[in-house]
Amino acid sequence: MRVYNFSAGPSMLPIEVLEEAQKEFLDFAGTGMSVTEISHRDKAFAPIVEEAEALLRELMNIPENYCVLFVQGGASQQFAAIPLNLMKSGKADYIVTGNFAKKAWQEGKIYGDARCVASSEDKTYTYIPDVDKIAFSDDADYVHITSNNTIFGTRYAKFPETKAPLVCDMSSEILSREIDVNKFGVIYAGAQKNLAPAGVTIVIARKDLIENPLPICPTMLKWKTQADNGSLYNTPPCFAIYMANLVLRHLKKLGGVKEINKVNEYKAGLLYDFIDNSSFYTNSVVKEYRSIMNVPFVTPSKELDEKFVKEAKANGLVTLKGHRLVGGMRASIYNAMPVDGVKKLVEFMKKFEQENA
Ligand SMILES: *Cc1c(COP(=O)(O)O)cnc(C)c1O
């Protein structure tokens, strides 16, 4: 029996995609081999990378002057790749809005003067600093932000206007809402939340920004290496890219980002409305910054939180335990979470409240 999996990542994939992968798992495109067995140099594989790139460009409306790369090492590897590719004058600004944002900043400090220009750590990351009031440095090589904060359940309602290129970690919200790529210098995202199984990371970088990596930048971390080789410099995560391609096809069939965003807003609305109308459950994020992907909430006590997670699991609603930094519960409701899953969760929450309030 399939359960509703509220994991923050790796997370659910659309059932149609899993079935498609299953159908062609033993014989991919008439090769008589599984896609996990064919060479990345095989002529059956090249079209997968090409199609995935083309679909991502179409769905996100990525302009021609940006390259699209499929790399490994997760978003965390990019925390280092960003300064190594961009920190020419040794300075960068970071907005610290959560655990991953902080990690990115700390990694930046290894390579130069990475400054935290705004942080929401004072209130345990329950809001996003007002981007219009931030004093950015005049001489920064880039400004780094995390658009959706997976652990704390916040997202930027509005992106900062910066002189330096804006570099954005979109791991937990890529393809969930429409964004204007032109506003960013670099967008990157580990795929295991909204796009594919773990193993592939997307980098979308303005072409003029990838030309002068620092001399110490390892070959594999140079975006230019990947760009010059169509993401096939070395063996790529073939299966993850193949799955990403199936997910992108599926998303296109659903009507693209605009349509999935409507569904995402609806799903998040169901959950937040219920929480806000209940005196039993609490979400402590400032409303205008609430994420539509990750929804943390608590009951009145730690004991009830534990009981909630256990009983929810017995009801087919799994991985609802919150991150250890926040406690309580967290429902991650990415693109692939069906509306029905959120409805089932709300029904369960209602019942649990009645039995335990
Ligand atoms: C999950 C996540 C990461 C870490 O991704 P890895 O691929 O595990 O390195 C980084 N940033 C954000 C916003 C995330 O949600």
Image (cartoon, rainbow, N blue to C red):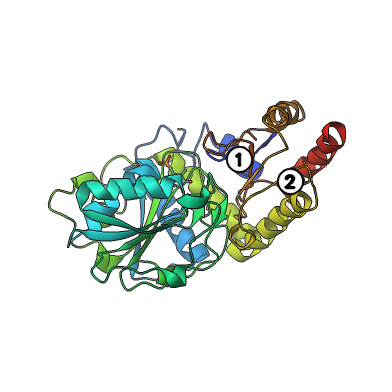
User: Residue at the location (52% across, 63% down)?
Assistant: 59
List the residue tagged with mark 2: 342
Q: Which residue sits furthest right?
A: 354
Residue in front for this viewpoint, 13 or 76:
76
Q: Amino acid at mark 2?
A: Val
Question: Closer to the camera: disc 1 or disc 2?
Answer: 2
Q: Position of residue 104 (x, y in %)?
A: 35, 48
User: Residue at the location (41% across, 43% down)?
Assistant: 200
User: Residue at the location (33% across, 43% down)?
Assistant: 77
In space, the residues marked 1 and 2 are separated at their CA atoms by: 13 Å
Quadrant assignment, res 2: top right
Residue in front for this viewpoint, 147 or 303:
303
Quadrant assignment, res 224: bottom left
Q: Residues within 10 Å of mark 1 (few under 14, many from 20)?
A: many
Q: Amino acid at mark 1?
A: Met
Q: Are marks 1 and 2 in contact (CB under 8 Å)?
A: no
Q: Residues within 10 Å of mark 2 (few under 14, many from 20)?
A: many
Q: Secondary structure at mark 1?
A: loop
List the residue tagged with mark 1: 12
Q: Reply above or below: 5 against 260.
A: above
**Residue 164 falls left or right of residue 15:** left
Quadrant assignment, res 330: top right
Q: Reply above or below: 15 against 319.
A: below
**Residue 71 falls left or right of residue 160:** left
